[in-house]
Amino acid sequence: MNKKKITRYSGQDKALLTIGYILLGLFVIAIIVPMVYIIVASFMDPITLQNKGITFDFSKWTATAYERVMTNSQIWIGFKNAVIYSVVFTVVSVVVTLLAAYPLSRADFRGKGFFNVIFIITMFFGGGLIPTYLIVSNLGLVDSMWAVILPGAFSVWNMTIARTYYRGIPQELREAADVDGASELTFFFKILLPVCTPVIAVLVLWQFVAMWNSYFDAMIYLNDSAKQPLQLVLRSILIQNQPESGMIADMQSTAARAQLAELLKYATIIISSLPLLVMYPFFQKYFDSGIMAGAVKG
């Protein structure tokens, strides 16, 4: 018969555990409460929301905000663009990151210290907004998908995570590949990458989320509304439904528009977050192992 091992804690350990549980509980509450508030508020009647705050009276709930957003044809164009931009950006970024990290992880690569310093410098010093725009403009990328994708496709932080993960791969794997006569490309694509699934999943999730939530680059570089991603479209919808200064004379209309704008704000948060919430569970099993291994190995 197997006996369970009983762990005995001292008074100090119990106090630390209690404090830890309390802090963890407060952290969970700080995450869940705003989410519940946003979800409930997005379905409420705007007048009730303004006067009483959120209530759980389902009989007074309405989908007006979602109907207003989803019936906007530009939403679907923005959603399609956001998916395309995010997928292409993620593929380009992960491929470039993995390829750049591999030679820097090799002990026999001459000059890796110099390249590491060069990469690290770019983490702290950037060219600035105007020089970056001029480069993108001179390359003829303005108002194209690549203006949004290429400037941020390479991340030194992600490269560092991948490089550290590579260093944790047993050297015997490399030696066995050399004995079998495998080339560098064969070793990288057929042997190394298959065992790096956790860190690749982490990079994919990070880069996809970064591009999905990005709107500033699109706002600067994209002039054609047919090329705007979802985040920029949602921003435009919110701005269009804000009360205008010329409407102050019609107080009732102004109040109604302000109330609708408040609901639209919550609805757009839910719509823009939903794809990421659906995506995350499929990567969760790789996420913890990938980010921890990439951070501590080497």
Image (cartoon, rainbow, N blue to C red):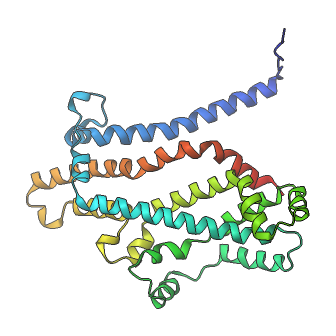
Q: Residue at x 46, y 73 (%)?
A: 148
Q: Looking at the image, is 77 positioned above or below residue 124?
A: above
Q: Looking at the image, is 103 positioned above or below residue 21?
A: below
Q: Residue at x 22, y 57 (%)?
A: 72
Q: Looking at the image, is 243 positioned above or below residue 184?
A: above
Residue placed furthest toward the top: 1
- x and y percentages locating residue 126 in the rendered image: 60, 79
Residue placed furthest toward the left: 250
Residue placed furthest toward the bottom: 138
- x and y percentages locating residue 60 in the rendered image: 21, 32
Out of 161 and 194, give the one closest to the viewer. 194
Q: Residue at x 66, y 72 (%)?
A: 123
- x and y percentages locating residue 167 in the rendered image: 82, 60
Q: Is residue 195 left or right of residue 227?
A: right
> Residue 128 is drawn in which quadrant?
bottom right
- x and y percentages locating residue 64 in the rendered image: 21, 44
Q: Image quadrant for the C terminus?
A: bottom right
Q: Residue at x 40, y 77 (%)?
A: 220
How many marks the image carries: the answer is: 0
Q: Is residue 135 left or right of residue 81?
A: right
